[in-house]
Image (cartoon, rainbow, N blue to C red):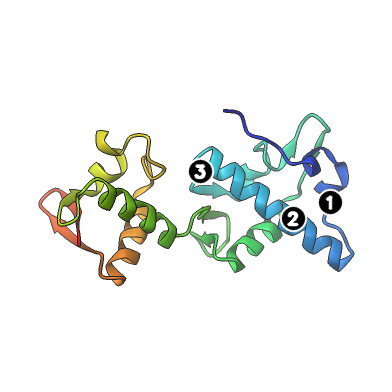
Amino acid sequence: MSFEWPWQYNFPPFFTLQPNVDTRQKQLAAWCSLALSYCRHHKLYTLDVMEAQESPVFNNKKIERKLSIEAIQVVFEELRKKGNLEWLDKNKSRCLVMWRRPEEWGKLIYQWVSKNGMVNSVFTLYELSNGDDTEGEDFHGLEEWMLLRSLQALQTEGKAEIITMDDGKGVKFF
């Protein structure tokens, strides 16, 4: 399935931050939506700001327009304010992208556990994110940092407990 670009993506002014406050807010909302949709479609969880400028999401070669590094940082900062992005370094050059929040992933995982009658079962993190049983599930292939945050959210709700096992971490669902 190919990624569907929004109409703005082929509109050259979209690639220049607009000075009018109202227009700029709509533009940033559209950029945030595009960035999250693109990351979700390609299952991207980490981004590098310098590399992002050359990625198709911020660089439309068809119309020969790309968003500046400064504008990308403004979009990323907007995503951070909304809780969809976390910086990995003080220089703000690399970030974690959360197109689904940990609580949402936790809910999906717990629904799968319940639906398959696996409450009171223990899983390794590998089994949950890469096991044969989870193939085809949205959380299959989830990066470990996000999986752990999702399980911590479930632990806070009393639905799971993260446990340390000989060969790494695991989780028991309640």
Q: Quadrant of residue 169?
A: bottom left
Mark sitting earlier along the chain (3/2): 3
Residue 122 seen by the camera: yes
Residue at 56% x, 48% y is: 48
Residue hosting label 1: 16
| Mark 2 residue element | helix
- Amino acid under label 2? Ala
- Judged left or right of residue 170, residue 8 is right
- Does dot 3 land on a helix, a strand or a loop? loop
Residue closest to the eye, 96 or 111: 111
Residue 63: x and y, percent? 83, 33
Label of residue 71 in the image:
2
Q: Of marks 3 and 1, which one's residue comes earlier in the chain?
A: 1
The reply to whether dot 2 and dot 1 touch (C-beta < 8 Å) is yes
Report how far apart the C-alphas of labels 3 and 1 lie in the structure. Answer: 24 Å
Q: Quadrant of the N terminus?
A: top right
How busy is the neighbourhood of tag 2: few (under 14 within 10 Å), some, or many (20 plus)?
A: some
Distance from label 2 to label 1 (Cα)? Answer: 8 Å
Q: Nearer the viewer, mark 3 or mark 2?
A: 3
Name the spot of residue 118 as percent of width and height, x first: 19, 50
Q: Position of residue 38 (x, y in %)?
A: 60, 42
Disc 3 crowd rating (10 Å Cα; few below 14, some 14-19, many 20+) is some
The foreground one among 132 and 55 is 132
> In the image, is residue 24 above or below residue 135?
below
**134 in relation to 157, above or below:** above
Q: CA distance from mark 3 to mark 2?
A: 20 Å
SS at circle 1? loop
The spot of residue 28 in percent (x, y) is 74, 58
Point 36% across, 40% down: residue: 140
Identified at 14% across, 48% down, the residue is 167
Q: Which residue is mark 3?
A: 44
